[in-house]
Amino acid sequence: MRPIPIRFALPVALGAMAVLVMRNKSRAPAPAHPPDSAPGRTARQHWFGDYLVTGRTVTIDAPRQTLFDMLRDPARLPGILSNLQDMQAIGPDTWRWHIKGPLGQQIEAHTRIVEERSGESLAWRSTDDSPLDTEGKITLRDAPGGRGTELTARIAYRPPGGDVGHWIATAFRRDPHSQGRHDLKRLKMLVETGEIATAAWYKET
Amino acid sequence: MRALTWHGRHDVRVDTVPDPEIINPRDAVIEVTATAICGSDLHLYDAVIPGMQTGDILGHEFMGRVVETGRDSTLKKGQRVVVPFTISCGSCLFCKKQQYSACDNSNPVDTQDASELMYGHAMSGLFGYSHMTGGYAGGQAQYVRVPFSDVGPVVIPDGIEDEKVLFLSDILPTGWMAAENARIEPGDTVAVWGCGPVGLFAVQSALHMGAARVIAIDRHPNRLRLARELGAQVIDYSQTHVLEALMEMSGGIGPDAVIDAVGMESHGFAPDNIADALKQKVGVGADRAHALRMALMAVRKGGRVSIPGVYGGLVDKFPLGALMEKGLEVRTGQTHVQRYTEDLLRRIGEGEIDTTFLISHRLGLEQAPEGYRNFHDNQDEWTKVVLTP
């Protein structure tokens, strides 16, 4: 056998080492990641099957019951949910919603309340005939240090238009993540200050 | 009404715009009787603060007479008030902790996204200071809508003229908080970078709080003269090696506390500053932090760093090693104005503090663009411009 020319020796040695290192790495057992304390909605993976999961927690300086009663009062919701076009009762604890979507689209959902614990939680799910497949839950718990209530809103939904639809909605900030975040801030302002901040300095006519 | 509006870099104009009205229940409308151009307005004038839009009304140092009140305002028509530049709801977690400039509820929801992205959290609303902080119409105008008028405005008793109290809106509390953040102890040497209005008030406040020695750093002879008249020793950085001088003037120890009253637009031809200036020219987001770097190098081991100067973006070549290895303490932030107004108003009333020495020029609102140009181009003579609409 002819000896390997010296000019190839170094690359060959490095290559061999790289192969060994990689083999070694692939043989090492995958490190187990025990579940951490973070809520599932903050996982790097937002998709759970066909569903996107999002949620947000906000601390509001008010008792749980006050917040619950506000959210349970249909008359209060249009002032808080900025993309709500209209809502209508279509059955016991069942509502039809029209929501502004991206690019002038309108999104319709029919939801039914599936869990209600006064002052603690409120959950809803879309009915079988609902154009939008979604479910959500609001939970209320006392914030530490007398800071009021930690309100968490969670929404799982099958985005109309799948991935692409989700990207478009996100780009126009009409996805539930941005919408929800904004609406919770609006709720917080209303409860804590009695008004919703605006920089307008004259009324548009 | 007439108002000073922003149209781009070095382009401000007095325009006719709609009169303000009561929009929310806690609002008041103020007829402005005096307003000032702030050093931080020059950052807007230089277009280094992101989030400005054509037509934005500037001005966050103003006072006036109440002409209209909303249902839940505690003000009364006819009262004279000074309005803090920070808009604060008074009831959120931060306001309750007297961290008024961190108010959670005063920046409108739609304009919170930008600062959440840039800083990790949404900033509070400020008057006339870009859409990052709400896009609120400012006070270099005949009238202003004042949100949360039951929290911010300080009612001024008759008999104290406007010029004595106008600076309660920003620069006086800002200089005061800068000195407070320096946690001055008896015997301390305090170095202050920048002898603009905030730097000068920081000098005044530091002496008030018992500093044995205050050293003020600038290059403008007139500004250095004002600092000297307040009782400071001065360093002209165009003539002197600042770091060496500070060591010599503090007994070889270094200043116990340093105050950066310069902020994001440091001047001078130090190599780091030339690189910063180039980056700032290319786009907003890069700050010129030469003064702060120097302050971190100058301060003694275990010393205190107070930063009232405004920064908005990113810096590099930052002496983080000096910060850690010397065990420094850093305190900064937009001023929690409402925390200080009552105390400072009393001190003004009792003649303990006088701020009128600062005013170099008085102009009508219509001459505001000229005021901006001169305040920017001729910093030596133009130390503070007060406008009367």
Image: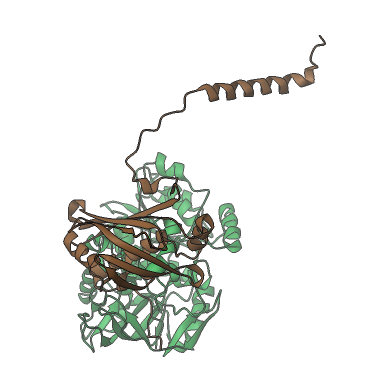
Q: Position of residue B330 (x, y in %)?
A: 36, 51
Q: Which residue lies furthest to the front in this view?
A: A129
Q: Residue at x 44, y 61 (%)?
A: A175
> Closest to the observer: B384 or B99?
B99
Image coordinates for residue A35, horizontal then vertical, percent: 35, 36
Residue B308 lies, with reference to residue B73, above or below; the image says above
Quick check: B318 above or below B77? above
- Residue B37 lies in quadrant: bottom left
Does residue B322 sit above or below B20 in this rendering?
Answer: above
Tell me what residue is drawn at x 32 percent, y 64 percent: A185
Q: To which quarter of the image does residue B387 belong?
A: bottom left
Q: Who's the residue at 72% across and 21% down the image?
A: A12
Q: In this view, does A148 lie to the left or right of A42?
A: left
Name the tint of chain A in the rendering: brown
Q: Which colour scheme is used?
A: by chain
**Image: A99 above or below B259:** below
Towards the viewer: B306 or A46: A46
Q: Can residue B291 be seen in this view?
A: yes
Spot occupied by residue B96 in the image (x, y as percentages of width and height): 22, 62
Q: Which residue lies furthest to the top in this view?
A: A1
Chain that is green in the image: B
Total labels drawn: 0
One can see residue B227 in this view: no
Q: In which quarter of the image is the N terminus of chain A?
A: top right
For this rendering, which residue is in front, A38 or A153? A153
At 50% from the left edge and 23% from the top edge, which residue is drawn? Answer: A28
Q: Where residue A139 sits in the image (x, y, percent)?
A: 25, 54
